[in-house]
């Protein structure tokens, strides 16, 4: 039997200005499934592609998803992509197994928690204050640098990581510390020394049932103050800020190689909702 891809419709322009197309997976000329390929515009010498909406009908699987995914990789290679990014829901065990078999490696995870019940108290010996206009430029520079390092460690090239880190901050904080629905806080010790910082976006997304989802964009503890529980305190502060704003669901990204952060979030009750994996196209 011959398995091929056939365009389901014309190529379209993606929301980010890239290109996207839906394909049918065909076996001997009959459709048995489909998938979508997308390619973002090239940035910093790198063009990332993605494969999404991959499905094969029951009774026609027998390796057709594998063949379809490999054919999609060839499409993205012809589009000039140098890397493929995919997202796998936490419950999709078969899709995760397929991705790993095809050479995709996990780069980061989405986690989430429902903020029900009593919130943990904040330490009385510590205080926190908003990051105001005077402190914001230095905080932003440090935040961009930390994000760039995480992206590089996760496999992004130096130029791509630098461009993305700056772009993501500019997009998420268009008005700096005055950006609406944004929590920017420094955590302070009794001597008023900065122990770490927190950045939360209170209305990052909307869940399927209409509830707002807040997002922890950054939790950062100064290197000299780590291993004293301040990361946990900052996460508790994030939960308090969400509840005060009437938001009861909080999510975040964690890079897969950041074992201490993953252990912290696990202990706080955050659970994986999606995995992001990547594969270089050589």
Image (cartoon, helix red, strand yellow):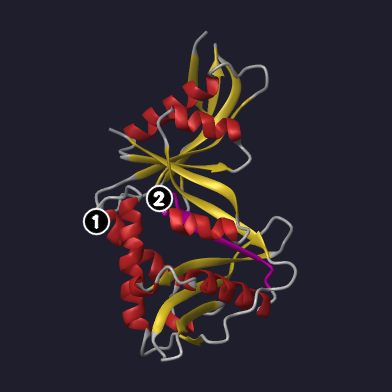
Q: Counting other residues with Cα less than 10 Å from the Cα at mark 1, is it few (<14), some (14-19), or many (20 or more)?
A: some
Residue at 58 percent across and 50 percent down: it is 272
Q: Which residues are magenta?
A: 247-258
Which of disc 1 and disc 2 is earlier in sequence? 1
Residue at 60 percent across and 20 percent down: it is 31
Query: 271 or 163: which is nearer to us?
Result: 271
Residue 261: x and y in percent read: 47, 59
Q: Residue furthest top?
A: 1
Residue 88: x and y in percent read: 54, 41
Q: Name the image quarter holding the C terminus.
A: top left
Residue 254 counted in the magenta span: yes
Residue 146: x and y in percent read: 34, 65
Mark 2 or 1, closer to the camera: 2
Residue at 51 percent across and 28 percent down: it is 98
User: Is residue 274 rendered to the left or right of residue 145?
Assistant: right
User: Is residue 155 rendered to the left or right of residue 213?
Assistant: left
| Disc 2, SS | loop
Give the residue pinned by disc 2: 257
The answer to whether residue 39 is visible is yes
Residue at 62 percent across and 17 percent down: it is 60
Q: What whole-number distance in Å separates the C-alpha atoms at marks 2 and 1?
A: 20 Å
Give the residue pinned by disc 1: 159
| Disc 1, SS | helix
User: Is residue 22 rendered to the left or right of residue 280?
Assistant: right
Q: Quadrant of residue 260?
A: bottom left
In the image, is residue 190 above or below residue 278? below
Query: 18 or 226: which is nearer to us?
Result: 226
Query: 225 or 39: which is nearer to us?
Result: 225
């Amino acid at each position: 039997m011959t398995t091929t891809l056939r365009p389901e419709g014309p190529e379209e322009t993606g929301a980010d200005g890239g290109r996207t197309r839906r394909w049918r997976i065909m076996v001997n000329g009959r459709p048995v499934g489909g998938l979508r390929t997308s390619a973002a515009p090239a940035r910093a010498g790198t063009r990332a592609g993605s494969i999404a909406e991959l499905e094969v009908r029951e009774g026609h699987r027998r390796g057709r998803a594998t063949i379809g995914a490999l054919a999609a990789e060839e499409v993205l290679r012809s589009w000039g992509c140098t890397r493929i990014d995919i997202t796998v829901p936490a419950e999709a065990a078969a899709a995760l197994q397929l991705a790993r078999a095809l050479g995709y490696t996990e780069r980061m995870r989405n986690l989430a928690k429902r903020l029900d019940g009593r919130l943990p108290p904040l330490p009385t010996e510590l205080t926190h204050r908003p990051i105001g206009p005077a402190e914001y430029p230095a905080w932003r520079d440090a935040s961009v640098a930390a994000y760039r390092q995480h992206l590089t460690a996760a496999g992004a090239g130096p130029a791509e990581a630098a461009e993305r880190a700056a772009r993501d901050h500019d997009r998420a904080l268009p008005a700096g510390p005055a950006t609406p629905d944004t929590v920017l806080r420094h955590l302070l010790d009794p001597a008023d020394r900065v122990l770490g910082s927190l950045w939360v976006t209170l209305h990052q997304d909307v869940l399927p049932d209409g509830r707002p989802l807040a997002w922890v964009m950054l939790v950062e503890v100064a290197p000299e103050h780590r291993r004293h529980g301040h990361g946990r305190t900052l996460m508790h502060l994030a939960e308090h800020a969400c509840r005060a704003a009437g938001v009861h669901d909080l999510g975040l990204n964690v890079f897969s190689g950041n074992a201490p952060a993953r252990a912290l979030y696990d202990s706080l009750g955050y659970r994986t909702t999606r995995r992001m994996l990547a594969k270089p196209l050589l």
